[in-house]
Amino acid sequence: MNQEELQVVAFEIILNSGNARATVHEAFSEMREGHYAEAEEKLELANTELVEAHRAQTKLLQDYASGIEMKMEIIMVHAQDHLMTTMTLREVALEMLSLYRKIEQ
């Protein structure tokens, strides 16, 4: 895999995980307003966006496992960091949604 191809995949991961991150923050806003169903929908949408980012990551891992050489670049490190922190943020948001619902009861 050449440098340009790796950068394209990195930006795909960044784009999709960035969209997911923005959607998670929209879900937080919905939670604060007591709109739990809307927050849940946002978190589901964020998951869909994360799945797209994860597909790109998985393809890279499969290529690497099959012996395709890759020169790791800082943009890929950034992309991986972006994806993993957004996945964690969504997990925290799901827990917070559960807590908001319990508090309201």
Image (cartoon, rainbow, N blue to C red):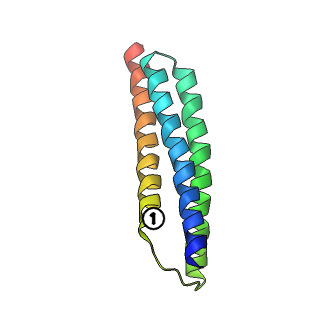
Residue 43: horizontal and vertical position, in percent?
A: 54, 35
* Residue at x 51% of width, y 21% of height: 36
Residue 89 position (above or below residue 70): above
Say how many tags the image has: 1
* Residue at x 52% of width, y 49% of height: 17
Q: Quadrant of residue 7?
A: bottom right
Q: Quadrant of residue 46?
A: top right
On-image quarter of the N terminus: bottom right
The local crowd at label 1, few if under 14, some if 14 to 19, many if 20 or more residues have their Cα within 10 Å, is some
* Residue at x 56% of width, y 71% of height: 6
Residue 78 position (above or below residue 31): below
Amino acid type at circle 1 is Ile
Q: Which residue is mark 1?
A: 75
Residue 97: horizontal and vertical position, in percent?
A: 44, 28
Relative to 36, 62 lies left or right: right
In the displayed image of the protein, which residue is found farthest to the front?
4
Foreground: 16 or 33? 16
In the displayed image of the protein, which residue is found farthest to the top?
105
Relative to 56, 80 lies left or right: left
Residue 82 position (above or below residue 26): below
Relative to 53, 93 lies left or right: left
Residue 66: horizontal and vertical position, in percent?
A: 61, 83
